[in-house]
Amino acid sequence: MEPNPVLKEFFIVLRGRSRKGFCRGCIGRLEAETQNGEMTGLLYCGGPNAGSPKNGGVVRREDTYPLTRHQAQLLLYVSSVSKRLELLCNPQLFSAICELNVDDLVVVKNKKGHKVGLVRNLMQIGRKEGKGDLQMLAFEVEFLDSDQTSKKPAPPSLFSAVDIIQVVPAYSVPLGLNWGDGQYGGTNKKAVTRINSMPNIRSHGRVQENHTQQSIIQSPNHSAPLEVGSLTQVVSNTGVTVYGVVRWLGVPAGKTAEWAGIELEYDVKGCSDGTYGGQRLFTCKKSRALFLPVTKCSPDSRFDCFSTGSGTPNHTEIPTVPPYVDSDEYVAPIPESEAMSLLVGRMKGIQGHINSCYLDATLFSLFSSSMTMDNICQIPDDTVRPITSTLRKIINRLRRQGFVPAASVMNFRNQLGCDTFRTEEKDPEEFITVLFQKVLGIEPLLKLRSRGESYQGAYTFQIILEKEQMAHTPTVQQLMDTSCLSCDVKFEEMPSCLIVQMPRFGNKYKMFSHIIPSMELDITDLLYNSPRQCFICGQLAEYDCLQCLPDHKMHQGRIKSYCTTCNTQVHNHPSRQAHSPKPLSVSAEVSTSSPAARHTMQLFAVLCIHTSHYVSFVKFGSDPHSWVFFDSMADRYGDDQRGFNIPEIQACPELGNFLSQSEEEQAKVNPLHAPELVRRLLCDSYMFLYQNPAMPLSNSNHQHP
């Protein structure tokens, strides 16, 4: 097939094995694209000829992420391909870096730790000799000394985009304290307006107070007093705001006023691991504990959706969110008749913040509408722990108001007690295990028996198989059947909730380009010691055969169970004589002529991932079109440091149209030509969530710690 010429564009490869041409993390330029989604293009390598392209071969469009020329130039200067992808996984920061201007404040990391500086120039690096050459871009940053009048500043240094960890645009800094005209080598300097409210940080985590009037900024909202677990912010003497969580409150030895111990979101040189004055007051990672008077702390303004701020709204005006009073009382799942009016729109769902999309999408999928999960929201008061109460308030607010602010979710993450859950993006599978086991104390959702041995508990089911075992476009039902038979795994009993993980590893690898959802999952043949029907005649089955699974003449991808007679006849065929059917455990009390009951589960949510960002699709009710799409970070208000994310929920009836078709019709659909949200579900699916409404999780499933 001849490629179709298209407009040239830049991209970064997200996944794929290292080859002579395109590989994961490299920068390319599109030359042509075929109708089946494959692209040919030029490859920009590292080293002295970083900006000169060479033939990169072929790469699939679904394995790439589009870039503007400016973004490609910034990423090309980052020598580590893994660091390029890591920066791309932080879209808010990357977007802010791409929009940096002269005199914007930034925090950069170098050999001496984190330092604050001003962007002085954007430098083009490399020779441009050919038409296709791509010059790299680096930032020239001039550091700000803590004592700005003591000496002449050092000359600016070059930094790549990945060296910048925080951005404070110049327009976001209000007017106030000015530098002298002769300072920093010129008169064309913008005023730095942030007045110091962070004490000088010295070694060993000791703090020296600064009593000048200019050094203190009063809290903009003293009506919300600080308490342990509060989200707070502090402004340094260089005008950069740092954020953290209050871990300790009290009066340190030798002090008379109340102080706060704050765990910062990232390392700061001179901070401790939670010790102050030789005494441990709390525990955190090294270089993250800051101690200072509570008068110098302010509530974290990033979670104030009603502040006027310095940013400007994106696209359309942000809807007003009405006030809400937290309550521990039980709130029923959102009924189908109210779901669209309550949920659809901007500032709906769960507001994301700091890589929280894995948690936002999971909580929304599990608790917004599922009746199976509903009983765990009705735990008796005497068993409620603080973190369980926090989770219940999140669920109640989502169900009653349709919106949960990021502060509530951040408080929940902090209470989880694991540092990586507070500051880094995690896998939903890890979070689900912690949620059910540690937070809710619920026994494993699944009891899996492998090779006839005693069963083991699990909270999710991971599909494990070889790609050659499946058709090009498998269904979830086919994946389940093949995985269970090939691994010789059975369910000990019918689960009330089944969370199925697709054969992929986050955003780094996926086995199939797209997967067709199975609205109804039949697990009758996957239950241990459960009667099942013969695939041929409908009598009681006594054998099943793994080798018959891919037989396209007999419903490819479905489990084939046979009675004794049909097993003999089917395997008399020359093409099946080498098969090894396995006998089934059948109770003597079961009649060989009575039909076996079918055991099915219903799909109620799908978690998806693309470029390390998680979103979800949720079904509200029995109508085939009652689907919504949720993204906790669909848009952004303001800049990276002073703004906040805007969650959004969209109605998705087109998904119902697609899922109402037969499997044969669905398999013929090209995802590239499908509606956008349908394409995202087919190509980006990561977890399928099934429920058995007749078997809700009961309080008896709760463990008692």
Image (cartoon, rainbow, N blue to C red):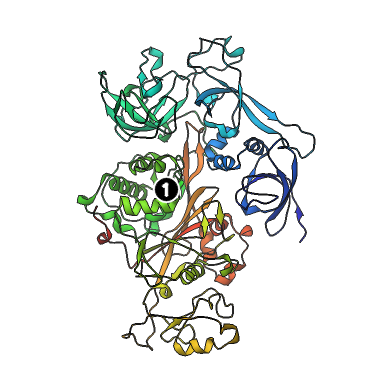
Q: Is residue 183 left or right of residue 127?
A: left
Residue that numbered label 1 is attached to: 359
State the residue at coordinates (49%, 88%): 566
Type of amino acid under label 1: Leu
Q: Nearer the viewer, residue 325 or 82?
A: 82
Find the residue positioned furthest to the left: 382
Identify which residue, 661 or 38, lies in the foreground. Answer: 38
Please tell me in which quadrant of the rendered image residue 386 appears: top left
Q: Is residue 169 above or below residue 133?
A: above
**542 over 206 or under it: above or below:** below
Residue 198 at what x, y percent from top left? 40, 21
Q: In screen coordinates, is 100 left or right of 443?
A: right
**Would residue 284 be found to the left or right of residue 2 on screen?**
left
Find residue 202 and report its horizontal and vertical position in percent.
40, 20
Residue 693 location (% of width, % of height): 35, 66
Say if residue 701 shows up in the picture.
yes
Looking at the image, which is closer to me, 124 or 637? 124
Q: Work out whether residue 421 or residue 374 is closer to the camera in this orientation and state it.
A: 421
Where is residue 329 drawn, in percent x and y?
Answer: 26, 49
In this figure, what is the number of numbered marks? 1
Q: Secondary structure at mark 1?
A: helix
